[in-house]
Each structure stands twice: as C-alpha cells, then as structure tokens.
Amino acid sequence: MTTKTENELIRPLNLWNALPREGYRSLEKISTNQSWYSVYRIDPQTLVISEDGQFDENVSYLVMGEKRAALIDTGDNLADLRELVRGLTSLPVFVLNTHRHLDHIGANYLFDEVWAFDHRVSREAAALGVPQPHVLEVIQPGSLCKEIPAPFYEKAYCIPPYRITHWVRDGETIDLGGRTLEAIHTPGHSPDHLCFYEGRTRYLWTGDIFYTGCVYTHLPWGDLDVFLRTYEKLLERYDEFGLLMPSHNDPCIDKSVLREMHALALQARRGEGTYEAGEGGMRKYRGSCFSLVIGEKQADR
C-alpha cells in the first residue's frame, strides 16, 4: 500500500474546479464591497460568508435575530471581516466559536464579544493567538486561488490574542430576540467543540464535526472514540434536525450524512474496510461526499 504525505491525503487535486460548490447554487448571492468573501442568503435572517479563495474554504454564518446577531466563527483573518459584517447588519454582533482551531478564530480579536466553550485549549488559544510560523500554512503555495486584498503583510500575518467574554455551557440557550440557539458540546475533533441548533428552522451548525471534505480526528486533542460518542449524542436527536450548516465548503447539507458518518467512523474504529494510508499511521476512509481521517492507534488494528 502506497503511503501518502498528510498534504496528499487531505488536499484534493483540482480543488478550485469544484467552485462554486453545489450547496451555493440555489442561494441568492449578495453583492458586497469586498473581493475576499462571498456572501449568500440562506433565508432573510441567515447569511453564509464563504472564504472560497483559500484551501480550507472557511464558512462563517451571520445569524440575525430581532435584538442582536451571532457570527458563528471568524475564519483566517485574511481580510476585514468586521467591516464586511457592519455592511450586512446594523444589529450588535457577537462571535460564537465552534472551536479554537486557527481557521475559526482568525478575526475574533476584531469583535468586542466572543463566546466559546470553557476548556484548556480555548483558554490557551485566546491568550496566545496563533503566531508565526504556525499560521503560515494558511497562505502556503497552492493554498490560494484569490488574491488577498491589500493591505496584507505576510511577515506580520498572525492570529492575534483575543478576549473571551462568555463561557458557553452544554445545553445553554442563546437568545437573539425572536431566535434561540442551543449550544451542544460535541468534542472529538477538538475538546472544546460546540454545535448550535435552532429549533424553529431546524438548522444544526456543525462546525468541524461534519462538512463535505476531510473531517479529522488525527490532530492533537482529536479522539475517535469521543467523536463516536458525539455522533451517538447527535443521532439521539436525529428527528429534530433539518439542514446541517458546516464550517467548511458547502452549506445546507441534508442530515442523512450524520448516519453515514457514524457508520464510517465505527468501521474505522474497528479497523475494517478500505482506506488510504498516510504518514505517521494516518488513515483516510471515504464516504459519499466526505472523508474521515484518523490517526495512528485510533483503530483496533
């Protein structure tokens, strides 16, 4: 069996040929004064903000109530997200982080209110940010298909520290005025990971627990067994959910993929089925519109 590097395992060939992705084709595109972000309307009070010029294709969501708006994740900090959001709503905006990985916290420092799950890793991320050279993976050769808007200084690029103003609890309800989100603790990809659920629309914002692409449990603090328990927790509420709103690639995904991912993760845990081998014992299992990458010693054999 050929062993691939991590980049070969997780980065598809001809990535940019897939743009715009299928999930956006039925959505209204909103004109803005920024070239970096692509903004689409899911419904009158829910917008998706895509960084489709960078490999990770980070997706943020602006969820607007009557009194305030939640910005779910803030991307890579390659352009002025705060200025973009100011042009999209006059409501006061606060950040809801799904988790502390750098591609979700990049512009946190630009906002006065940041909410996150209380865990050692989220506290460390807020206190330290992400300095160079670690952040440079975002702009490495082959990672961009758009020009980063000026002014951008590669030598100064980093994720600055930020202040978390509220620690979110599992099961906490978040009132936006006329809209209520429920926070669901969903570790496995990262121990501080949260999903957010809105009963009225039946949207489930899944962060990195599910998206169309390579979902990881091999990163530091990732845990396949915990990931499986998270999926069991979500599947207990399967009938409540409608569309999934992931933090990468396509929005508006049918919930049926939750069952498929759970089955694939069980297969991977048992060491069954076919997979692509990567360096350091990584394994990539393929689903219908996604893959699962697990780490060494996360499978039975």
Image: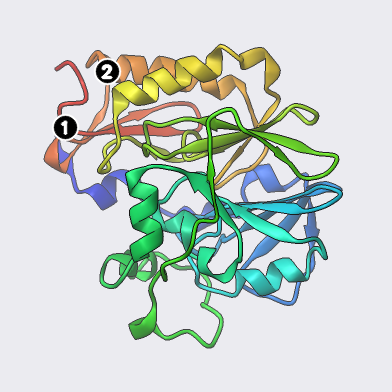
- Residue 34 placement (x, y as % from top left): 68, 75
The disc labelled 2 sits on which kind of residue? Arg
Camera sees residue 184: yes
Is residue 288 depicted above or below 59 in this figure? above
Q: Nearer the viewer, residue 189 or 2?
A: 189
**Crowd rating for badge 2 (residues with CA inside 10 Å; few <14, some 14–19, many 20+):** some
Is residue 171 depicted above or below 21 in this figure? above
**Crowd rating for badge 1 (residues with CA inside 10 Å; few <14, some 14–19, many 20+):** few
- The reply to whether discs 1 and 2 touch (Cβ–Cβ < 8 Å) is no
Circle 2 — which element? Answer: helix
Residue tagged 2: 269
Circle 1 — which element? Answer: loop
Q: Which mark is residue 123?
A: none
In which quarter of the view is residue 286 placed? Answer: top left
The N terminus: image quadrant: top left
Q: Which of pointers 1 and 2 lies earlier in the amino acid sequence?
A: 2
Is residue 7 depicted above or below 214 in this figure? below
- Residue 241 placement (x, y as % from top left): 67, 22
- Residue 294 placement (x, y as % from top left): 27, 32
Left or right for 27, reference 106: right
In which quarter of the view is residue 52 placed? Answer: bottom right
Q: Residue at x 55, y 35 (%)?
A: 195
Residue tagged 1: 296
In which quarter of the view is residue 222 placed? Answer: top left
The C terminus: image quadrant: top left
